[in-house]
């Protein structure tokens, strides 16, 4: 029995040893595999895993670039950047945001609405994302927050950059303004710039600010920051500054622009002045204007409602987006078309009995008694409608439209401004395409005096006048230089109209302003070095019935403002050596010769004299009145302004 028990014990021992060896071998194999894998990861793949670890720990953030500045032709600042003191709060550090905000309210002015806004925004953002509590605060408020920092956890004063328009209303319609990036802005771009994702980043919303966003924005810089597990910034590792946006120099003269705005006063009007030698725009004014700084800072509902509810439409840039019947200023085009077609010459006459009869219908002249026999000079000087009714029938609308396009009408001119209109230079094909109707004789008669379907902007009328004065197909230019480098331009080619015909029409415009009894004589310039040639226009905005004509047409001053005629005038000077052309439209202003012509005269004198219009250039009988009117204009003190914003010489 003992021997049997001993054999069983030996067998058990042998089995246990085999199992131990097998288990030990398996464990050794596992350890060997783990060791090999550990060596592979720690030694062979060390660089790769170190990179992954760094990427988890290090974050790349964009640095917004400084926006390019905008200057006038003489280096005066129009749009710049200023330091902006603001207060931010980070929910992760603040803890009880409501409690901290109410403590902050006792330190700086902060409304309950501001607190509600910040709390609402805090709920939508990650805890480590800073939120702007107060923007554009004073230095004193900034200092008070810094002093009370221990009792305001999570609250930080910051210094940033903000857009400022030191000439505010003068350039609102030209330069426009910037504002925060919206969802609409992002959706409008196929591949949005990553800069647009930065909270509170601002881009151009109107005018030059938006149309030259490509050069004004600049390029972002980067900074590498170390963040913790929840994404909070621990420290900055390095920084690469971005590239600031390019500075722009415009062709406009800020002092002339200010004079024009002041001269328009409370009118709903627009003025465009152009250098006829090269197409440079010297002034583009639309009245009334608005303060673009309100939009940068976040315009209030009250202020915005005041702008949108104003019947003079201060937000509209009438100079380029307003399309008006050009009235009798269009007779320049009809006259040129008739000369080109060979149906008249300078001495051809037309008899005006006060109306033109065609197909049993009478088309009336503005003078009920008529003008008698008139040649081209007389027709332009007295602005006789019948003369142009007559010649238009011999020329035809297609030829008139062709000439109008040569003069710059009926086309959109490429400028970095918002809502530039094309206007309408109608012909037979245009009416068929637009209305599926044949062109009628009455349409030509109406078009010949700038009524009916014809529409033009003040910009187009100024260009028309500039081309007539120079004899060249000049194109308007607004940006003069980018970062000090002159924008290359080519000399404008000669206008495709015989120079002799241009001289005839120019002489007719000289008659308008310088011959006794003509429509623009009271607004003449008596200084022979700056003699003006011009053409008035009065565009109807209502139909005058036969019954009203029979009992007497109601005068403009007896009508509601919105039913009065538009007043227009175009002019250039000096007559013998043209340098500047100006167009003016005063909405519902009445007569062009009495309302718009004096404005054009004043603007021409301001530009040509290089200072306030000289009294000696006005008729002697008007000087006392004009001296008083000029002295009362609310002009800026540019000498004082230069000390605040600086004047910088640019190309």
Image (spheres, grey):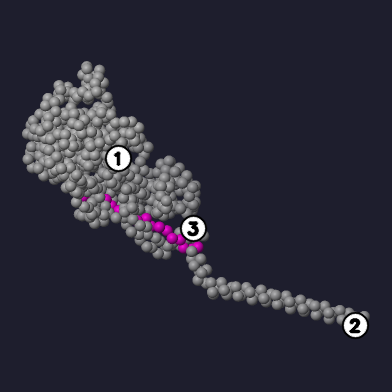
In the image, is 10 to the left or to the right of 63?
right
Vertical relation: 505 (above or below) 446: below
Q: CA distance from mark 3 to mark 2?
A: 76 Å
**Magenta part of the chain:** 56-73
The count of marks equals: 3
Label 3 Cα crowd, 10 Å radius (few <14 / some 14-19 / many 20+): some
Residue 63 highlighted magenta (yes or no): yes
Residue 175 highlighted magenta (yes or no): no
Q: From the image, state whether disc 2 or disc 1 is nearer to you.
A: 1
- Which residue occupies the extreme bottom position in the image? 3
As helix, strand or loop, the secondary structure at mark 2 comes to helix
Where does residue 221 sit, x and y in percent of width and height? Answer: 37, 59
- Res. 405 in view: yes
As helix, strand or loop, the secondary structure at mark 1 comes to loop
Which residue bears the numbered disc 3? Answer: 231
Residue at the image point whose x is 80% and y is 78% from the top: 15
Which residue bears the numbered disc 1? Answer: 421
Where does residue 288 sit, x and y in percent of width and height? Answer: 26, 36
Which residue bears the numbered disc 2? Answer: 3
Residue at the image point whose x is 31% and y is 50% from the top: 212
Question: In front here: 310 or 578?
Answer: 578
């Amino acid at each position: 029995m003992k021997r049997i028990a001993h054999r069983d014990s030996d067998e058990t021992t042998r089995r246990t040893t085999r199992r131990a060896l097998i288990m030990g071998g398996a464990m050794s194999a596992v350890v060997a595999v783990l060791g090999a894998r550990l060596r592979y990861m720690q030694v062979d793949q060390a660089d790769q895993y170190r990179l992954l670890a760094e990427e988890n720990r290090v974050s790349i953030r964009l640095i917004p670039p400084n926006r390019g500045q905008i200057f006038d032709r003489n280096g005066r600042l129009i749009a710049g950047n200023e330091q902006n003191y603001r207060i931010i709060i980070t929910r992760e550090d603040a803890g009880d945001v409501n409690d901290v905000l109410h403590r902050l309210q006792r330190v700086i002015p902060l409304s309950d609405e501001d607190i509600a806004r910040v709390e609402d925004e805090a709920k939508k953002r990650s805890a480590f994302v800073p939120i702007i509590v107060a923007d554009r605060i004073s230095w004193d408020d900034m200092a008070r927050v810094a002093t009370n920092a221990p009792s305001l956890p999570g609250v930080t004063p910051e210094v940033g950059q903000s857009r400022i328009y030191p000439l505010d209303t003068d350039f609102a319609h030209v330069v426009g303004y910037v504002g925060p990036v919206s969802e609409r802005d992002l959706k409008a771009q196929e591949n949005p710039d990553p800069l647009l994702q930065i909270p509170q980043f601002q881009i151009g919303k109107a005018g030059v600010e938006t149309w030259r966003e490509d050069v004004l924005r600049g390029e972002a810089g980067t900074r590498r920051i170390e963040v913790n597990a929840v994404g909070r910034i621990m420290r900055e590792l390095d920084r690469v500054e971005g590239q600031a946006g390019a500075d722009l120099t415009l062709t406009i003269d800020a002092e002339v622009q200010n004079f024009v705005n002041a001269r328009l006063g409370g009118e709903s009007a627009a003025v465009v002045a152009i250098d006829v030698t090269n197409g440079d725009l010297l002034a583009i004014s639309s009245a009334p204007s608005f303060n673009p700084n309100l939009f940068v800072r976040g315009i209030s509902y009250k202020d915005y409602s005041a702008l949108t509810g104003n019947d003079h439409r201060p937000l509209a840039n009438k100079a380029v987006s307003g399309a008006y019947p050009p009235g009798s200023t269009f007779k320049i085009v009809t006259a040129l078309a008739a000369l080109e077609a060979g149906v008249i010459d300078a001495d051809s006459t037309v008899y005006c009995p006060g109306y033109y009869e065609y197909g049993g219908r009478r088309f009336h002249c503005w003078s009920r008694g008529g003008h008698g026999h008139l040649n081209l000079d007389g027709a332009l000087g007295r602005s006789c409608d019948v003369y142009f009714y007559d010649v238009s029938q011999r020329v035809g609308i297609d030829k008139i439209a062709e000439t109008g396009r040569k003069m710059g009408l009926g086309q959109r001119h490429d400028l970095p401004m918002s809502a530039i209109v094309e206007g309408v230079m109608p012909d037979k094909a245009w009416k068929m395409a637009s209305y599926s109707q044949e062109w009628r004789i009455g349409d030509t008669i109406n078009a010949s005096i700038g009524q009916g379907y014809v529409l033009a902007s003040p910009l187009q009328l100024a260009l028309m006048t500039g081309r007539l004065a120079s004899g060249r197909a000049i194109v308007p230019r607004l940006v003069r230089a980018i970062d000090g480098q002159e924008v290359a331009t080519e000399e404008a080619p000669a206008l495709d109209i015989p120079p002799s015909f241009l001289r005839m029409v120019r002489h007719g415009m000289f008659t308008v302003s310088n011959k006794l009894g003509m429509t623009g004589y009271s607004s003449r310039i008596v200084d022979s070095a700056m003699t003006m040639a011009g053409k008035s226009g009065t565009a109807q905005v209502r139909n005058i019935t036969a019954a009203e004509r029979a009992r007497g047409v109601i005068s403009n001053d007896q009508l509601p403002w919105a039913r009065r005629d538009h007043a227009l005038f175009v002019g250039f000077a000096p007559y013998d050596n043209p340098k500047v052309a100006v167009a003016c439209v005063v909405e519902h202003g009445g007569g062009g010769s009495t309302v718009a012509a004096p404005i054009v005269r004043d603007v021409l004198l301001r530009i040509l004299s290089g200072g306030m219009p000289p009294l000696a250039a006005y008729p002697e009988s008007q000087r006392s009145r004009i001296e008083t009117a000029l002295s009362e204009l609310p002009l800026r003190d540019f000498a004082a302004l230069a000390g605040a914003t600086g004047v910088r010489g640019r190309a």
